[in-house]
Amino acid sequence: MLTGQITSAVLGIALAGAILFLVRRDHLHGPYALWWFAVAAATFVLGVFPIVVVWLGHLTGIVYAPVLPIIVGVSLILIRMLKLDIDRSKQERQIRRLTQKLAIIEQELERVGGRPARAADADSDRA
Amino acid sequence: MATYRIDLPGLDPQNPASAAAPCLVASADSRPLRAADCLAVIPARNEAGTVADVVAGVRRALGCDVLVVDDASTDETAARARAAGAGVLTLPLGLGAWGATQTGIRYAQRRGHAGVVTLDADGQHPPEALPALFEAQARSGANVVIGTCIARLSRAKRVAWRYLRALTGLRLGDFTSGLRLYDGAATKLLAGPAASLLDYQDVGVLMLLAKHDLSIEETPVAMLPRREGHSRVFASWWVVVRYMLNTTVLCIAQLDVGRRHGHVTSDPA
């Protein structure tokens, strides 16, 4: 049992450490940092004190306690992925609109100043 | 090069309509659109072989400004379109047919055009058919007029459309026709972010229009077989399946829309 506890402690501490390192290095943007900081804290606590799981299992009435972190973990992963796709859709919308705006602005810029514009203006009176 | 009007309201002597605030919102506005006040938008991806003829044809038929939206083409599409007298917008990233069309709609909105007429760059929509859209708009006062060629539809498409009619509640003969006339209200709506995540100009766009109580009218037109290229939607079975699945999800998410609004009027021919 002791070796099992050491394994989980090592995993928890390593994961928490890696996340903290990334947050410190500014690789994770604002709200993501907060989320991962919480995950790091949870893995640390559960890794070092697996007894918490047993206590939580007792509290929630789940007979086979070790399944509890798995259920919670998978649920959180699903929520996280859902949020990820929501964010991606939002970004996709922004990218598309920026792409369109870029094409429009580029054309207007050409009309005002660039080389193809002068030809365009000279012709525009005829058309 | 096409003429571009100065879009300061009230300052353009050639276009008195632009003085009355560009793109009126009132959907009940039944004033017929004048072709000269509209912008013809032609989305094009690698259509160098046909785009010049299409541009010339539209300018002959309508005498309006023509804008080709070059959807990240790798050929001479933009240069040929420019040489034929169209304004050209070049998208740095490929956005697909609807993304390109919406770019043109946003441009028209920005420049204060009264409406937008769209057609494909591959030459399947004869420019001579364009005035018929304006006539149908004047007759019906609809916000959107779709030019359809029922006879051209393949058996697979007919089945697909029957399915979509059942699913959406929209009574339309052809969902994908790119030959359309949008009035000011439709232009304003479709230029907005709500239409930016749509991948095709068909069901999603039509549902959005129906949701906002805009009326859609279909009018029969003669169409030519595509001279080059092929339908982007009906390109391969895998694409068709993916398209139908995406569209089904889109429809299921908004089952109420098409049924709630009886705004689609079809002109069966």
Image: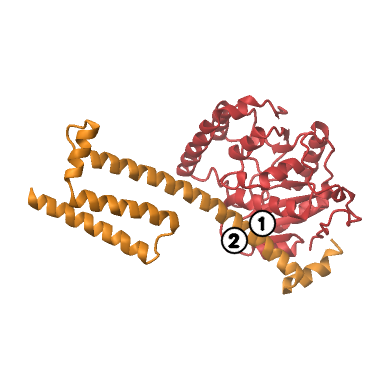
Chain colours: A orange, B red
Compare residues B142 and B235 and report the one nearer the observer: B142
Q: Residue furthest right?
A: B13
Q: Is residue B90 visible?
A: no
Q: Secondary structure at mark 1?
A: strand
Seen in the picture, residue B161 relative to B50 is either above or below; the reply is: above
Q: Secondary structure at mark 2?
A: loop
**Which residue in the protein does label 1 denote?**
B69
Q: CA distance from mark 1 to mark 2?
A: 10 Å
Q: Chain of mark 1?
A: B
Seen in the picture, residue B72 relative to A118 is either above or below; the reply is: above
- Residue sitting at x 63%, y 37%: B208
x and y, in percent, of residue B164 in the image: 56, 31
**Which residue in the protein does label 2 denote?**
B73
- Residue sitting at x 68%, y 36%: B149
Task: Tell which tag, 1 or 2, sits nearer the viewer.
Answer: 1
> Left or right: where does residue B154 sit relative to residue B69?
left
- Asked if the residue at tag 2 contacts the one at tag 1, i.e. Cβ–Cβ closer than 8 Å, the answer is no
Q: Amino acid at mark 1?
A: Val
x and y, in percent, of residue A16 in the image: 27, 57
x and y, in percent, of residue A121 in the image: 81, 68
Compare residues A124 and A50 and report the one nearer the observer: A50
> Left or right: where does residue B53 sit relative to residue B260?
right
Q: Amino acid at mark 2?
A: Ser
Q: Chain of mark 2?
A: B
